[in-house]
Image (spheres, helix red, strand yellow):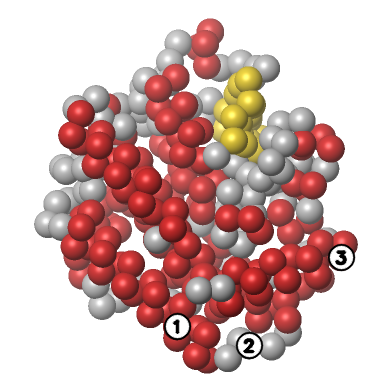
Amino acid sequence: MGPHGAGRDGSGDGNKSNSSSGGGGNNSDSSSGRMGLELYLDLLSQPCRALYIFARSNNIPFEFKQVQLVKGQHKTEEFRKVNVLMKVPALRDGSFTLAESIAILLYLAQKFKTPDHWYPSDLQKRARVDEYLSWQHANVRAKGSKVFLTKVLLPLLTSQPLPAEKLEAAIEELNVVLKQFEEKFLQDKPFIAGSEISLADLVALVELMQPVCAGYDLFEERPKLAEWRRRVEEAVGKQLFQEAHEGIMNIKNLTADQFAPELLENFKQQLLKQVTQN
């Protein structure tokens, strides 16, 4: 549940297994897509939520393998066979396995021939999507995660709040990135690539929901971003979006004793390092 190493593109063993499909795109033919597609996800993770929403909203049939990062399920030998990096999300499609959320999103978009707007065939629109997806890792993702860690996870694990100046600094870093996002990527367009939603919008909004769920409402004084959020939610389906975010919306119900004891101290140290580094 931390950013990067501590489990955002995190990982795990599939305790819970559900068949899922979603609500509104083009399927590939069933012989190539229906059998054997498994997505290993923890919906507390932003990239996992983006994948879940994308697959469901495009009627992509898959088996949902729930991976609980706080239980250390990503450290098992069984999961290592799916992703040797021991992070979620991960995909298994028959004998083929794939790590890294952006790679998985692109694989699904192309295999299942989802509507063109998700990853446009138009060269310049696709370049806009690629541009955002390349930029976001060290910016929206990193800074949004830092607010979440500082405001929620570290106080939970250390049983004391971090100094106020740490949280203020994390929020200020995020505010700088949000200004860049509005001015460079969104501008006055309905969506990042133009008039229709793309993978870039979905990835962006799911990342921005992490600090929102931690109690920092970054949309409150940003009407342009708030309108964009509304359009993205409507494009994928509000109910599906809320379903995917149910767990993270209730993150404050998480307690330290829910973490696997053997992982707790190591996890705490990883998070402290991520929050304190500049």
In this rendering, would 229 be left or right of 144?
left
Front tag of 2 and 1: 1
Q: Are marks 2 and 3 in contact (CB under 8 Å)?
A: no
Q: Residue furthest front?
A: 278
Estimate the x, y position of residue 21 in percent, counting from the top left.
51, 30
Q: Which x, y percent locates residue 175?
A: 33, 74
For badge 1, the amino acid type reads: Ala
Q: Which residue is mark 1?
A: 169
Quadrant including the N terminus: bottom right
Residue that protrudes farthest toward the right in the picture:
262
- Are dots 3 and 1 in contact, CB under 8 Å? no
Callout 3 amino acid: Pro
Res 66 visible: no
Name the residue rendered at 71%, 43% in the picture. Answer: 86
At x 66%, y 45%, the residue is: 87
Helix, strand or loop at label 1? It is helix
- What mark, if any, has residue 161 been given in the picture? 2
Q: Sort mark 2 into few (<14), some (14-19) or many (20+) by Cα contacts within 10 Å.
A: some
Tell me, yes or no, if residue 173 can be seen here. Answer: yes
At label 2, which amino acid type do we have? Answer: Pro
* Mark 3 or mark 1: whose residue is earlier in sequence: 1
How many discs appear?
3
> For this rendering, which residue is in front, 110 or 257?
110
Q: Where does the image place residue 62, in percent across and percent down from the top left?
A: 57, 28
> What distance separates the C-alpha of mark 2 from that of mark 1?
15 Å
Please tell me whether mark 3 sits on a helix, a strand or a loop: helix
Query: Considering depth in this image, is 250 or 148 the residue closer to the camera?
Result: 148
Q: Residue at x 76, y 30 (%)?
A: 81
x, y percent for residue 128: 24, 42
